[in-house]
């Protein structure tokens, strides 16, 4: 493994992560996650063994480039045509179900 400091996975770390995720873990769940986190970190540590000395950094995951185009003003759909596609309308507006937010 690398000479970098390794993360010590213990109950304190798992409880801190659970707190950040707003999870209330039982003692049994905490112990289970300690074991699982250790297994995950051990598995991912295999990547430290890969020789990346002559590999250029990959800044982009895709070779696609954003294509810019000029903005063009276009006519809007006529109000009557737009409203004819709405399930319900009144005057020049689309009627939607009322939204209630409880506090």
Image (tube, rainbow, N blue to C red):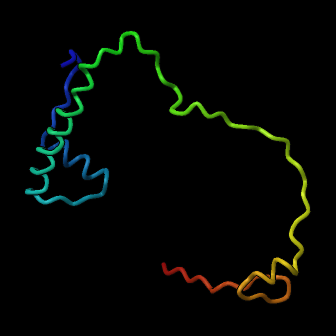
Q: Nearer the viewer, residue 41 or 77?
A: 77
How many numbered badges does the structure rendering display? 0
Q: Quadrant of residue 68?
A: top right
The image shows residue 18, relative to residue 63, as above or below, that is below
Horizontal relation, residue 91 to residue 16: left or right: right
The image shows residue 45, relative to residue 68, as above or below, that is above
Q: Quadrant of residue 48?
A: top left
Residue 29 at x, y = what percent?
Answer: 13, 56
Residue 72 at x, y = what percent?
Answer: 89, 49
Horizontal relation, residue 69 to residue 78: left or right: left
Residue at the image point whose x is 71% and y is 86% from the top: 87
Q: Nearer the viewer, residue 6 or 70?
A: 70
Residue 23 at x, y = what percent?
Answer: 26, 58
The image shows residue 2, relative to residue 19, as above or below, that is above
Residue at the image point whose x is 85% and y is 42% from the top: 70
The image shows residue 16, relative to residue 92, as above or below, that is above
Q: Quadrant of residue 81?
A: bottom right
Residue 71 at x, y = what percent?
Answer: 85, 46
Horizontal relation, residue 71 to residue 11: left or right: right
Residue at the image point whose x is 9% and y is 56% from the top: 27
Residue at the image point whose x is 9% and y is 50% from the top: 31
Can you say which quadrant of the picture contains the N terminus? Answer: top left
Q: Spot the residue most to the front.
A: 63
């Amino acid at each position: 493994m690398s000479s970098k400091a390794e993360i010590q996975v213990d109950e304190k770390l798992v409880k801190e992560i659970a707190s950040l995720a707003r999870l209330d873990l039982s003692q049994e769940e905490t112990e289970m996650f300690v074991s699982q986190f250790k297994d995950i970190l051990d598995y991912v540590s295999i990547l430290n063994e890969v020789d990346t000395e002559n590999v250029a950094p990959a800044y982009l995951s895709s070779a696609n480039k954003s294509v810019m185009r000029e903005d063009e003003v276009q006519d809007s759909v006529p109000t009557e045509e737009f409203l004819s596609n709405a399930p319900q309308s009144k005057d020049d507006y689309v009627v939607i179900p009322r939204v209630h937010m409880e506090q």
